[in-house]
Amino acid sequence: MANMPSEAEVGELVAKAAEKVEAFQKTLDSVKPILDKADSSAYAKDENAIAGARSILAALKKNGRSAYALVGLLSTLDDLDLDATQDSRAIIFLGFQTMANNNKLPEGMTAAVIMLDSSATSLYDISELVMHATLRFVGGEEAVLAQIFAEKK
């Protein structure tokens, strides 16, 4: 149990995760014009995923840590990381198609890819920290359960 993440540690991770989610939202808003050209459904899908992340983050802030909430946050952050990566690839593919037709690359394409890749990296980094805290939390809960069951024998 001594290795379990404290409420303060989880609170700090939740705050950092919220920052990364909001940064991804700003990136999406910034790259929306070119993203819409590359994949017209991506922005709405990403907005939905961000809303889910905000809901999980709000629940963690309100109710405190639990294995269920931490796993939910971890999964959602990984989904957002994947969304940012897929958006970046869609824009790169749009650039390839444009160049194949001997046309000029869309304005802001390079910046959009860089911003999305940066968001993906940030989301990945915080999800890895959440994963380690989650594993420590679950390990602590398992230790408590093992102790309870051992006492009942």
Image (cartoon, grey):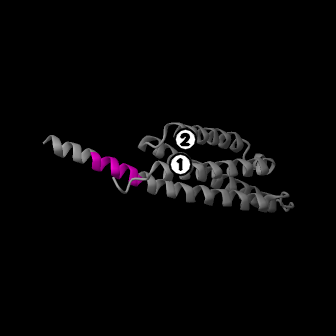
Residue type at tag 2:
Lys
The residue that label 2 is drawn on is 61
SS majority, magenta: helix
Instruction: Please determine whether, in this image, residue 150 is positioned above or below residue 97.
Output: above
Residue 62 on the magenta segment: no
Magenta residues, start to end: 135-144
Number of marks in the rendered image: 2
Per the image, label 1 sits on a secondary structure element best described as: helix
Query: Residue at 83% across / 60% down in the picture?
Result: 105
Q: Left or right: 150 with respect to 33?
A: left
Q: Residue 127: where, in percent of width, then height? A: 53, 54
> Is label 1 in contact with label 2 (beta carbons under 8 Å)?
yes
Local packing at callout 2 (Cα closer than 10 Å; few below 14, some 14-19, many 20+) is some
Query: Residue at 37% across / 57% down in the picture?
Result: 3
Query: Residue at 45% across / 57% down in the picture?
Result: 132
Q: Which mark is residue 11?
A: 1
Residues 67 and 7: in front is: 7
